[in-house]
Image (tube, rainbow, N blue to C red):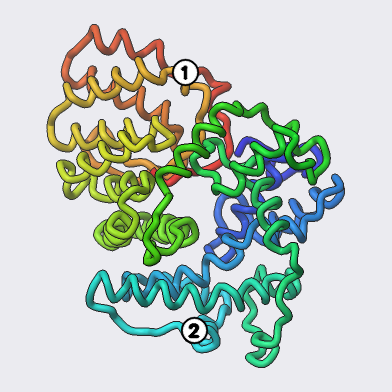
Amino acid sequence: MCEDHTGPRESWTLSSLVTDMRDALRERFEPVGERGDPLKRFNAASRELTRRGLDADSIVRYGMVVEVLGPMLTVLLIDLILPDGNADSGLRVSGVDLDGWRTLLGVPAGELTSHSEITSTLEKTTTSIFGPLLNWVGTAAIGALVNLSLPDTKDFWKCPPPPRDFRVLAYQYRWLVERVTETYVKAWSTASLILEYRYRQNIEPMSFPAFVWETRDLDLDEVSREIAHRTSAEWNPSPNAPPNSEFLLQQMTTHARSLLVAGQRAAAAALFEFAAQQWPDDASAQNNLGFCLVLDQPDRALRHLGLAARMGYEPMPINAYNRMCCYVALNQERHALETAEEFWRQRGDLVQNQDRAIVWILNEEGQWSLDRKARPWSVLVGLAISIAQRQGWQEEEDRWRPRLPPPAAEEAPGEEMA
């Protein structure tokens, strides 16, 4: 993010405020990083959003349920897939009673031996716990939600159901969050896409102040195409269709990121191996599995990354860069440059769209490391130039150097799992 974190929030854009509040919820149980104490950032953004006439509590309660519950459910659900994944250390240090939550919700513990057993247990568990959890989210104090304070057992199970319009409010506030924080409509929930279409076509009145709408100019045709694609791709006539992937995939991505930072590439790959089996038509699962395999199995990584590209994975620069890394790891530099050139011909216009991403970076000594703040297009061009230099391909180097993005394109909020 390019806002001044040491200065007042009054000058911040709406996108930066909501993004920082969302990121603070995601990071609230992690050590304090460069951007400061997550809870202080959360409170500062919340106050400024309230000052501007938005209900910050409702944005959290309805629009950020995934971020509120995610850290705790990551442990309880992903532990079924990946025992001993060490997903709970930060929460325990922060005082979250994970054992208490596990007992309260009746989530089973212990290693499951087969994919079918894991899938069955996940489906039964999520079916039984999400209703009561949403009841709690709808009534608990914001402080309890932020801190994941374990409620009294009797009080928890006696929580009144949320108001009848809870689902409507959740869809509306999630649309607000995704519209101002997610660059690519492929990252939006289907409900947000449909609401965008209904608002734009005057089928449904806008529920928020006009300045929310004015934060960005969105291509309605792109929204329509994505709705049509999902309507056909996600349709499943089987009564035994797998559970919705959105929540669990988001938690897998968050946890896999921490595993990669800790150097546990095999464990991160195991999460997405399960996701790719469970939801074979999900492009992000295929891309993320490929990313986790780049250093250890680059030939296999290429297959998953290529499949994700054919499925329309966004952001496209990330996928193209990941495939370049595979070719470099396989000592096929010419193929790496051809991949970059193909992307330039197809989508060179994306140079101005520079969300941050987690990527593998090759240093001058030939060692790979993880960069959590990379700009996809910048590192793609940089890798192309580096390859041309090492191979002595002067013509290719001269062609790629002018393609480095201008400084203005280097500032953009957000972070994607590569």
Name the kind of residue labelled 2 in the image: Arg
Q: Which residue is found at the position 36% from the left and 13% from the top?
A: 401
Q: Viewer-proximal residue, 189 or 56?
A: 189
Q: Residue at x 54, y 37 (%)?
A: 185
**How far is the residue under mark 2 from the one under mark 1?**
48 Å
Report whether 340 appears left or right of 148: left
Task: Give the residue furthest to the left.
Answer: 331
The quarter of the picture where residue 402 lies is top left
Residue at image position (27%, 46%) is 290
Q: Amino acid at mark 1?
A: Asp
Residue for point 67% across, 71% down: 137
Location of residue 294 with respect to 351 vertically, above or below = below
Query: For this rendering, which residue is in front, 121 or 295?
Result: 121
> Dot 2 lies on which element?
helix
Establish if 157 lies above or below 340.
below
Which residue is label 2 attached to?
Answer: 102
Q: Position of residue 264 (x, y in %)?
A: 29, 60
Residue 69, given in percent of the width and then of the height, sits at 57, 68
What is the tally of numbered marks visible in this picture?
2
Indicate which disc, 2 or 1, sits on the residue closer to the N terminus: 2
Say if 115 sits above or below 284 in the image.
Answer: below
> Disc 1 on helix, strand or loop?
helix
Camera sees residue 263 = no
Query: Which residue in the structure is indicated by mark 1?
Result: 349
